[in-house]
Image: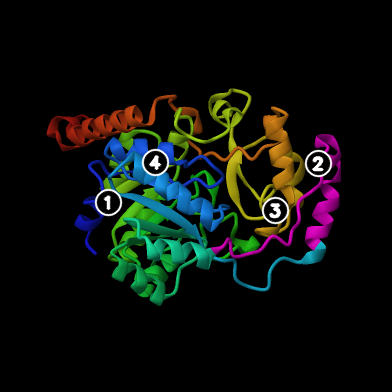
Amino acid sequence: MSTTALNDLFRYPIVQAPMAGGASCPELVGAVCEAGALGFLAAGYKTAGSLYQEIKRVRGLTGKPFGVNVFLPQSGPGADPAAVEVYRHQLAGEAGWYETPLGDTDGGRDDGYESKLAILLEDPVPVVSFTFGCPKPETFHAFARAGTYTMVTVTSAEEARTAQAAGADALCVQGVEAGGHQGSYRDDPDEEETGTGLLALVTQVREATALPLVAAGGLMRGAQIAAVLAAGAGAAQLGTAFLVCPESGAHPLHKRALTDPLFQRTALTRAFSGRPARGLVNRFMREHGRYAPAAYPEIHHLTAPLRKAAATAGDAQGMALWAGQGHRLARELPAAELVGVLAAELDTALTDLADPAFRSAS
């Protein structure tokens, strides 16, 4: 499909990122879509039945196009049981502190992938995106027959070429600045410190493939959206910017932490899930990040009760506070108002860039 097909999905080239864990709830998605951007549900960590119900709720809130993001099953032999057990002992003090048992690491590695695909093919939605890998060509063919536009998250030009060859309609290019999990195909501990910044990555992928691009990673202002459009993207995807909206399903402690001076910076960590993810640096990350093995989703299942207990106790220092590098720029606006502000900022930036006087002055 062409870039025109991608941009036909929305009035403004703004995509609300799918944020697993509850933030991307139907109310946020509906508000974003009604405002002229593209909202995304996150299927990750939900049952297929819960996903079906959320899709129904979105359809009750908007008739505009929206998307659903799906996690690919984790391939390979799985985590080293001994490393997971060592980390379990490392977290024993946390379990005692929060008075909750650690989670069962045998919770499955496929996140109900096939069941979710069945729902999305039986009752198609306008857009489906994939993270943590690239589906098989036959999956893309099936969605094409259903009339669904498909997109794959990529973190390198190599991954982008793989997705193009498999039949994806578009790519979500995720820079290392992005909050939450890095969507790379492989979880290689030797490569976790080699992430590429968004503008450089968009250029690399633009020159490696012919597919439409959605740029993601640390974007919080309309001028930044203009920058990625100038670099070759057809749209920009923002997650952290929408986390603080009243419609967001993020925990109130998470929302407040994004602009709390107590949390000065973000970092990539395996502490909460066993896979590199960017969040606000807090006590849990500092104390346990260095010991966490490459073991996703086993560590995610192991720490889930701790994270829930910390939230219940009102302790942000024990929660996974996912956030992109631009988190201090978050604005507590209703989702529709935020879309409007971003669109106005984008329009101003594009007008300035087109003005010869502006270019000569700069």
Q: SS for tag 4?
A: helix
Q: Which residue is situated farthest in the bottom direction here?
A: 138
- Which residue position holds label 2? 100
Label 3 Cα crowd, 10 Å radius (few <14 / some 14-19 / many 20+): many
Is the C terminus in the top left, top right, bottom left or bottom right quadrant?
Answer: top left
Q: Indicate how the structure is coloured in the image.
A: rainbow
Instruction: Report whether 304 appears left or right of 193.
Output: right
**At 32% from the left edge and 33% from the top edge, which residue is drawn?**
339
Is the residue 206 above or below the residue 97 in the image? below
Between marks 1 and 3, how big is the CA–CA gap?
36 Å
Q: Is residue 258 left or right of residue 201?
A: right
Give the magenta-colored segment's residue range. Answer: 83-112
* CA–CA distance in space, label 2 to label 1: 46 Å
Q: Amino acid at mark 2?
A: Thr
- Say what secondary structure mark 1 lies in: loop
- Residue 234's label in the rendered image is 1
Of labels 1 and 4, the one closer to you: 4
Of 294 and 85, the residue lying toward us = 85
In the image: residue 210, left or right of residue 103:
left
Q: Residues within 10 Å of mark 1 (few under 14, many from 20)?
A: many
Q: Give the residue number, with chain letter if any, for mark 3.
A: 301
* Amino acid found under the numbered disc labelled 3: His
* Residue 49 in picture, x, y percent from top left: 52, 55
Residue type, numbered disc 4: Val
Q: Quadrant of the N terminus?
A: bottom left
Q: Earlier in the sequence, mark 1 or mark 3?
A: 1
